[in-house]
Amino acid sequence: MTQERALRGPRLGRAPAYLLLLGLLGLAFLVVPLLALAGRTPLRGLPERIAQPFVLDALWLSLWTATAAMAISLVVGLPIAWALARLDFRGRSLVRVLVTVPLVLPPVVAGVALLTAFGRSGVIGGPLRELGISIPFTTTAVVIAHTFVALPFLVVSVEGVFRATSREYDEVAAVLGATRGRAFRRVTVPMALPGIAAGLVLGWARSLGEFGATITFAGNYPGVTQTMPLAVYQALQSDPEAALVLSLLMLLVSIGVLALLRERWFGQVVP
Amino acid sequence: MAVALGLALLLTAACGGSGASGDDQRLTVLAAASLTEPFTTLAKRFEADHPGVDVVTSFDSSATLAAQVAAGAPADVVATADPRTMDTMVEADALAGRPETFAHNELALVVPPDNPAGIHAVEDLDRSGVDFVVCAKSAPCGALAAQVLAEHGVTAPPRSYEVDVKAVLTKVVLGEADAGLVYASDVVAAGSKVRQVPLPRSPESSTSYPIAVTTDSKNPDLAKAFVDLVRSSEGRHVLTVAGFTVGADANP
């Protein structure tokens, strides 16, 4: 008896029914719409609908722009997360707030903000245009919009992991003669890899679903700026069945990627 | 359990708020994006004429509205920018009675005030380096734009298919596009923020606006009263000021 109790941990009593009930309610709320989507999707002609050029273009565009946005986020986001977690400097909380703002900003507002910065008459876009570079209505604009909304996801989650891995490891590395840069590359980042991967997946998923900032800043043209969510929205106006198919496709891609990454990265546990 | 019950009560209270209070009536009007200005004005007039009535307006692409209404979105009155989008609701049995035409609108070519690309005719859109935007083809303004562009032999693709006419106008107002195809009413709405470039008139460049009461309307009498206001001399005046054409066939 005591042995069994020791194995199962201390007895906390039965789980309260109301907690289970509310939890189930919440779960149903999340699952029912997705099941409904899958159930309503016309299966007949599914391959033909998916093989349409605009669908494949949109899917490919979505996948690679989200990946590009994550590559950029990784390069500039890791240093931000590291500075927030490891450096003591004045205005750190201000920096953290600034990084978090795009998280809570309505995406359309993010799109307008990007236009005022990178638009043809924008603060940065204006001078660029003098040089013959115009950003709106290009795939570059899509990547910029995705990076703007997804970078905070990476920074916030990676900062959390950096904080969770003790500063002592850095100190030990320093005692052993490593410079701070070397400690970052050889100790801090490797130890935080699963967390970084999780942050990347979160940001990637956010990019994949990005709509408001993209359509406001980058526009909507098949093959150039029309990502999957934009294609779904436009299909919904003329061909609701096609929109259902596209939505299901996105759902499957998202689930597929999550499952794949779970195997590869989330399976590892930090020692 | 008590918590769950409390939460459930709270939710019902929040959802059924308007019904419980009794006196206040709500009229939901869905209208094409191009009707934003005149219908906002008319909604205020209607509220003034009917104390206790709250008119909720929602403006979007006609195609989006048609899809929403056909899928059972709660609405009392719906007005679209062409008969085609209205027909999809007729086919879905979502409308009570036949839609009635109440206004017309002309397609218009607009450029930013400084006209950076030097556009003086619709044919100029075909020049390379001209960034112009149009509505998505599913939206009435996009269908019109496609016809007009084809009619004038413009084969250059637009830089973007915007979801509705106001999005096209915004891109031009912000100077992100060199030109855009919108409606005459949008030119009025934008005032000095855009410049209009004359577009040859043709039957292909005009669209008509139908309005109808929905089958699901909880307050069909009130909904009918709103339709009557739109078609009254007052409504026609508001529409004319907003840049719409109110033709003879808009009369009952």
Image (tube, coloured by chain):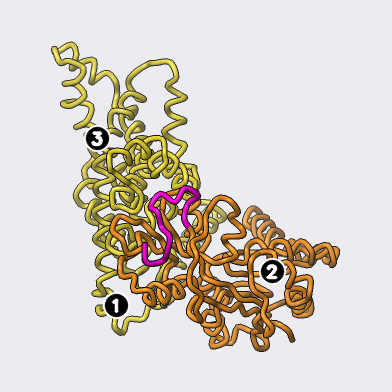
Label 1 residue SS: helix
Q: Is residue A88 left or right of residue B99?
A: left
The colour chain B appears in is: orange
- Which residue matches tag 2? B240
Type of amino acid under label 1: Arg
Residues tagged by mark 2 and mark 3 found on one chain of the structure? no
At 53% from the left and 53% from the top, the residue drawn is: B194
State which tag comes first along the sequence, 3 or 1.
1
Q: Can you tell which chain is drawn yellow?
A: A
At 29% from the left and 23% from the top, the residue drawn is: A166
Type of amino acid under label 2: Thr
| Quarter-of-image position of residue B54 | bottom right
Query: Looking at the image, do the residues carrying marks 2 and 3 touch, with CB atoms under 8 Å apart?
Result: no
Residue B119 in magenta stretch: yes
- Which residue matches tag 1? A49
Q: Which residues are magenta?
A: B111-124
Q: Which mark is residue A70?
A: none
Please provide percent x and percent y for residue B8: 65, 60
Q: Chain of mark 2?
A: B
Q: Which mark is residue A75?
A: 3
User: Within 10 Å of the Cα at label 2, are there few (<14), some (14-19), or many (20+) other Cα atoms?
Assistant: some
